[in-house]
Image (cartoon, rainbow, N blue to C red):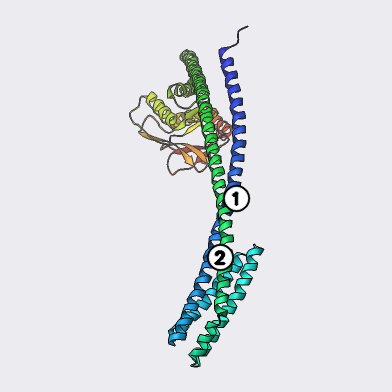
Amino acid sequence: MARDPGEVSGSNRQAARERAFSLLAVTVAALFLAFASLGGVFVWYDRSASAVSHTHEVRNGIADVLQALTDAESAQRGYVLTGDRNFLVRIENGRERAESRLNAVDVLTADNPIQQARVASLRTLMARRLAVIDLTMAQRRSGDAVAAIRTIRKGEGIAAMNGIRLIVAELEAEEARLLAERGGQTAAIRAVLLCLLIGFGAALTYLFIGAQRDLSLDREAEADTSERLRALLADRTLLLDEVNHRVKNSLQQIASVVRLQSRSTPDGEAREALEKTLDRIMAVGRVHEQLYKSGGEVGLFDAGHYAKALAHDLVDSLGRDDVRLTTEVEAHELDLRQAVPLALILNELITNALKYGCPADRPCAIHVGFRTDGEQFRLSVADDGMGLPKGFTPRSKNSLGMRAVEALARQLGGRFVVEQPEAGAAFAVVFPRSL
C-alpha cells in the first residue's frame, strides 16, 4: 500500500532534523575544542610576549647602569680638573641611578642563575669603581688635586670600569640570545594562532551554512504546519458557526411552536407562562445568533453587547413610546459556559421590570448596567416603578422568575442581590470573572 505523501514528508523532515542535530552536536564540540585551543594559545602567546618584554627591560636596565657609571666617571674627571661643585651633583645622580637600575636588573634576572652571577660580579666592580670616585673626590675637596690625579693614574678605577663593560657585554649578549629565542617562539605562536583562527572561521562558516539549511527546512515545516493549523481552525470555526446557526434556527422553530400554543390557549395564566417561556427561548436563541455572527474568538461571548441588544429588543417589543431605556455596559468577553445563564437572568430581570415597574398608565424608565466590580462582574437592572414590598426577598413571593434568577446566579458561582433604592426596584447579579 502506498504511503501518504504527508507521512513521507514528515519522515523526511524528522530525518533531516536528526541529521541537523547530530551535525550541531559535532560542530558545538568542535567549537568548544577550538575555543579551548584558542584560550591555551592566547595564554602561551601572552607569556611569550611578556618574556620578550622582560628581556627588553633587562637590556635597557643594563645599558642604563653602564651609562650612569660613565656619567659619574666623566663628572669625576671634571671635578678633579676644575673643582666645580656642580660636578658633585652629577656624580651623586649617576651613583643613585646606577644603583637603582642595577637593583632592578637584579630583580628581573632572579630566575636566571647565570645572569645573577654576572649581576653579583657587576655589583662588586661597581662598588670598587665608586670607591675610587669617592677617594678622588675627597682628595680634591681637601685641595690636593695632584693626589687625586695620581689616584686616577693608578688605573684601579679604569680596570674596574673595563671589567664592568665586559660583564655588561656578557649580560647583553645573553639577553640578546634570549630575545632571539623568545622572538622565534612568539613567531611560531602567531603562526599557530593564525591557523586556529582560520580553522575557527571555517567551522563557523560550516555551522552557518548548516544552520541556514536547517532553518530553511524548519521554515518549510512551520509553513506547512501553519497552513494545516489555519485550515483546521477555519474548519472548526465554520463548524461552530454552523452549529450555533442550527441551534438558533432550532430554537426559533421551538419558539414558533410555543407561540402558536400560546395563541390557542384560552387560560390567561397558562398563556402568560407560555409567553415567558417564549421570551426565555428567544433570549437563548439570541446568544447563539451573536456567537455565529460575531466572527470573534471561538468560545467567547460579548456580554456587554448582548445585554444592550436584548434590553432594546424587549423594550421595543412592548410598542410603547413612554418607556425610557438607558444602558451603561462595558464590553467584556465571557466564557461560553456563562452565556446562557447570563442571558436567562437578563431576560427575567428586564421582563420583570417591564411588567411591574412600567404600568400602562404612566411613563417609566429602566436602566441596564454591566461592568466590572473588582475581580467580579456586576449585572444590574433597575426601574422607577412603585418599588418592592417591604421585606421582599426572592423566595418571599411565589415567583418562578425570581427563584430561577437565584438558581442561575448560583450556577454562575455568584449571588443574586435585591437592592433597596429610594424609588423603584433594583436587582443585581454579581459573579466571578471566570468559572
Is 247 on the left-hand or right-hand side of 174? left
Local SS, label 1: helix
Quadrant that contains the N terminus: top right
Judging by the rendered image, the residue that carries numbered circle 2 is 169
Q: Height in image: 18 above or below 124?
A: above
Depth order, front residue of 193/285 = 193
Residue 434: percent from left, percent from top: 55, 35
Judging by the rendered image, the residue that carries numbered circle 1 is 44
Quadrant of the rendered image containing residue 27: top right
Quadrant of the rendered image containing residue 286: top left
Residue farthest to the top, as pictured: 1
Residue 36: percent from left, percent from top: 61, 44
Q: Badge 2: how crowded within 10 Å, few (<14), some, or many (20+)?
A: some
Is 53 on the left-hand or right-hand side of 381? right
Foreground mark, 1 or 2, reads 2
Q: Which mark is residue 274?
A: none
Quadrant that contains the C terminus: top right
Q: Are marks 1 and 2 in contact (CB under 8 Å)?
A: no
Residue farthest to the left, as pictured: 321
Residue 190: percent from left, percent from top: 54, 46
Residue type at the position of mark 2: Ala
Residue type at the position of mark 1: Trp
Q: Is residue 87 something that shows in the picture?
A: yes
